[in-house]
Amino acid sequence: MSPAPTVLVIGGVGFIGRHVVTYLVENNLASEIRVVDKVLPHTAFLNERQNEAFRKVEKDGSSFDFVFNLAAETKYSMSERFYEERIFLLSTLNAKEAAKRGVKCFVEVSTAEIYQSDKKPSKEDAKIIPWTTIAKYKYRAEEELKKIPGLNLVILRPSIVYGMGATAGLTPRLVCGRVYQHLNEEMRCLWSKDLKINTVHVLDVARAIWHVAVWYRDNEKAGKGPFVYNLSDPGNTDQAKINGLITQIFGVKTGYHGSSIDKLAQHNLDGATDEVNDKHATPWADLTRESGIKATPLSTYVDKELLYNNALSVDGTKIVEETGFTYEVPEVTVEKLQEIIDDFKLNGLWPKDMI
């Protein structure tokens, strides 16, 4: 039997990266793991399970079979130059080095936000109209990576990734649910109940990253790619589903503002964004202060780019059909969202429950 592969995880302290590292360590999948990240693990709000995994990560290493690129700027509404450096150049420089070193598989984690907003699920060959600036530079990076000679490339495009430790994606909705529980008010959303916000659990993303690398190597796909796969569970999540789960968790009523407010928001999204964020910020600050929380990565803040009426509808079946991958978390459930909250509670990052 050949030795287990050596792995470099770039951006390995981030939300997805920490789950990848933990998955590799706990399942003894790699003979050596090295993590590169601008953030130090002890400042990244890792939970104890993740901290234990990082204690077993190698400090050295320069030769790797697999490289997983999860490094990218995740803040919205930054300057174009910022994304040029922290997404496009970062990805291309890492990929060129991987090609030069003969890495057996380079997995680039992109985003499904590159697709045209549409109720119809986007397949990998769907029309490309990125609807966030991050997605614009992710797609530019994808296209540049495809041109690099000798790069053994697999690109993954996940929909909204959620799970323990997530501070973006679905988590701000959970934070707002806690705020409305505190306020004893109905939680109302912009746009319609059937707005698609398709999802994929972070553990399935971690499994998929490893799965495609091994599949690429074992099926002798070198030089035959690049291969591009969406990652999206079959649950076809929309706003109505998430709101229903929030009602179950927090006992708050949920609803929608209606067409007149939606139209106003479309014409003045800056004002709508400010109003939404102002509504939630003070109650959340009160909740954390009353619970004695001095620092938390959680926030009610929602960026304007994410408040547009854009559907994220993604077909994640190609990776199943072509590589044999299976989704172990087929849909969002109360239990999976509660895991997120409980993990933050355990680490002293979530306000105390109402009495």
Image: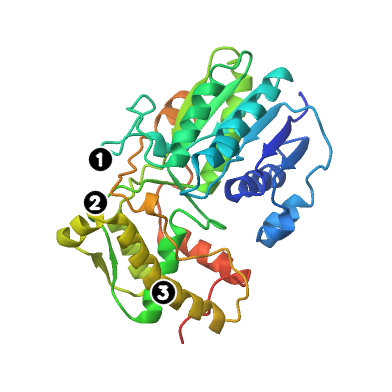
Q: Position of residue 351 (x, y in %)?
A: 53, 76
Q: CA distance from mark 1 to mark 2?
A: 9 Å
Between 305 and 191, the residue placed more toward the observer is 305
Indicate which disc residue 119 carries: 1
Q: In the rendered structure, which amino acid carries the disc numbered 1?
A: Lys
Q: Label 2, on which residue? A: 194
Q: Position of residue 209 (x, y in %)?
A: 58, 35
Q: Residue at x 53, y 22 (%)?
A: 144
Helix, strand or loop status at disc 2: loop
Residue extending furthest toward the left: 260
Q: Label 3, on which residue? A: 179
- Please give left or right for residue 202 compared with residue 330 in the image: right
Between 122 and 269, the residue placed more toward the observer is 269
Figure check: 170 above or below 328: below
Helix, strand or loop status at disc 1: loop
Q: Residue at x 79, y 27 (%)?
A: 63
Q: Answer with the quarter of the image where residue 268 lies.
A: bottom left
Figure check: 131 above or below 102: below
